[in-house]
Amino acid sequence: MKIVKWVFWVFIWVLVGAFFHYTLPQTDIVRVTDTYEKRIDFGNSSIFWAGSSTDSAGQAVNRDVFFIQTRRAKGDVMVYRNEDTGWGWPPYFKFDTANLQAEAADARSTTGAPQYYALKHYGWRSELLSIYPNAISLRAVDGPDAVKGIPFVTIIALLLFAALVYAIWVRWRRFRRARLDPKIEAIEDDIAARRGRFARWRAERRARK
């Protein structure tokens, strides 16, 4: 029983961690190498695209999406999509996709004359599922070793979540002590009393034989 309980809670916390890792903003120091626009056919991964179009049957269709190609400070290549989040989730209220694409196009540089930028984004990159992190903003930095800055949004979000979890846990403990524990104890006492009566009945029956 304890193993099932541990597996359940590990599964829950893995889901929570994955949710925050996907949703909360992250910053990469990158050099923009190119920008382009591509028509995307949405399939099983449509959930990872912001406001993907659907047909009358609710099936994901296709639309044009902006992309920003970069090379990160560590040397690896990373491609970001550039989509509005609008009023949906995650709540970044991003409506400036076209402006950000213009900034990224103007920020392109070569290996010989690199210019580095701090690119804020959320989401994951998976070549297998063909999903890309979504770019949120772009700002110039001094070089590949530039400090990314303090992630205030992430810190505040995690603190609020921790406070919510703690508040729920405290109220659950009070509810359990006040309502559940007395009933559980009463049930256990009743079961123990019945077992005692049954044991006495068996003992009396054996004595008669």
Image (tube, helix red, strand yellow):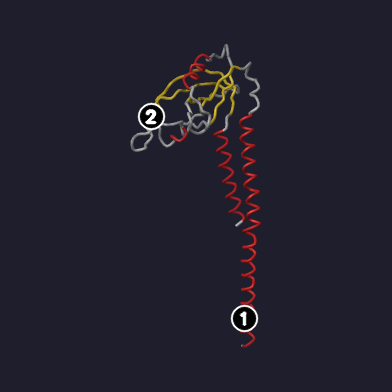
Which residue type carries mark 2?
Asn
Q: For residue 55, what is the image quadrant? A: top left
Q: Is residue 209 above or below residue 163?
A: below
What SS does tag 2 mark?
A: strand
Crowding at dot 2, Cα within 10 Å, few <14 / some 14-19 / many 20+, comes out as some
- Front one among 129 and 62: 62
- Farthest top residue? 113
Tell me the quarter of the image containing the N terminus.
bottom right
Tell me the quarter of the image containing the C terminus.
bottom right
| Label annotation for residue 49 | none
The disc, 2 or 1, on the residue closer to the chain's N-terminal end is 2
Q: Position of residue 52 (x, y in %)?
A: 42, 31
Q: For residue 28, what is the image quadrant? A: top right
Q: Is residue 82 above or below residue 164?
A: above
Q: Position of residue 37 (x, y in %)?
A: 43, 21
Name the residue tied to disc 1.
Answer: 201
Which residue is pictured at 60% across the width and 53% down the height? Answer: 5
Q: Position of residue 39 (x, y in %)?
A: 39, 25
Name the residue tied to disc 2.
Answer: 62
What SS does tag 1 mark?
A: helix
Which residue type carries mark 1?
Trp
Q: Position of residue 19 (x, y in %)?
A: 55, 38
- Front one among 186 and 7: 186
Q: Is residue 125 above or below residue 16?
A: above
Which residue is pictured at 64% across the width and 37% down the height? Answer: 159
- Farthest bottom residue? 209
For the residues bearing labels 2 and 1, Cβ distance under 8 angstroms: no
Label 2 to label 1: alpha-carbon separation: 76 Å
- Farthest left residue? 56
